[in-house]
Amino acid sequence: MIYYDYKKELSQQQCLESLQKTFGDSCVSRTAVYFWYAEFSRGRDHFEDEPRAGRPRSVVTPGNIEAVRQLVNVDPNIAYQETEDTVRIGLAAAQSVLHDYLDLKKLHVVGCLIV
C-alpha cells in the first residue's frame, strides 16, 4: 500500500494517515513509511532484500562437512581460519562441522612426552 500511495503521489503524511485509518494500531510506523518513500525515490521498485556486504551466513551442508573432512584428513592440525577460507564458511559453521559432525576434539598435552 505504501508503494501504491507513492505512485499516486500522496505525501508521506497522507500515506501514513491512510494506513492508520485502515489498519489502526497494527499500522506500520511513521519511520517505516518515510523509509520506503525514500527507497522508492531512489528508484527501488522491488521488495526483495538487497544484497549485503560481508560474508553470507553459512549453513552446515553435507558438502561443507565432506570438504572439511577432506581438509582434516590432509592436515589434522589445520587452523579454523584456513578451514573457513578454503571451504568459504563462517567460524561458527567451521566449529560446528569439526566438533558436532566430525566429532573432533582439540587435545592439549602439557608436560608429557608421548613416545
Image: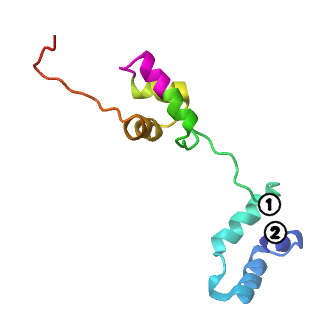
Q: Could you tell me which residue is drawn at 52 percent across and 30 percent down?
A: 66
* Frontmost residue, 40 versus 88: 88
**Spatial separation of the CA atoms under disc 1 and disc 2:** 8 Å
- Which residue of the protein is positioned furthest toward the top in this rendering? 115
Identify the main secondary structure in magenta: helix
Q: Position of residue 38 (x, y in %)?
A: 74, 61
Does dot 1 land on a helix, a strand or a loop?
helix
Residue 1: give its label: none
What residue span does the magenta drawing correspond to? 69-78
Q: Which residue is under mark 1?
A: 40
Q: Is residue 103 above or below residue 2?
A: above
Quadrant occupied by the N terminus? bottom right
Inspect the magenta stretch and tell me whether residue 32 lies in it. Answer: no
Mark 1 vs mark 2: which is more N-terminal? 2
Inspect the magenta stretch and tell me whether residue 77 lies in it. Answer: yes
Q: Could you tell me which residue is drawn at 57 percent across and 33 percent down?
A: 63
Q: Position of residue 101 (x, y in %)?
A: 42, 39
Judge from the rendering whether residue 52 lies leftward or rightward of residue 74; answer left or right: right
* Frontmost residue, 53 versus 103: 103
Instruction: Determine which quarter of the picture holds residue 28.
Output: bottom right
Task: Tell whether label 2 touches label 1 (CB within 8 Å).
Answer: yes
Instruction: Determine which quarter of the picture holds residue 91.
Output: top left
Q: Which residue is under mark 2?
A: 3
Crowd tier of the residue under label 1, counting other residues whose Cα lies within 10 Å: few below 14, some 14–19, many 20 or above: some
Which three-letter amino acid code belongs to the residue tagged 1? Answer: Phe
Crowd tier of the residue under label 2, counting other residues whose Cα lies within 10 Å: few below 14, some 14–19, many 20 or above: some
Which three-letter amino acid code belongs to the residue tagged 2? Answer: Tyr
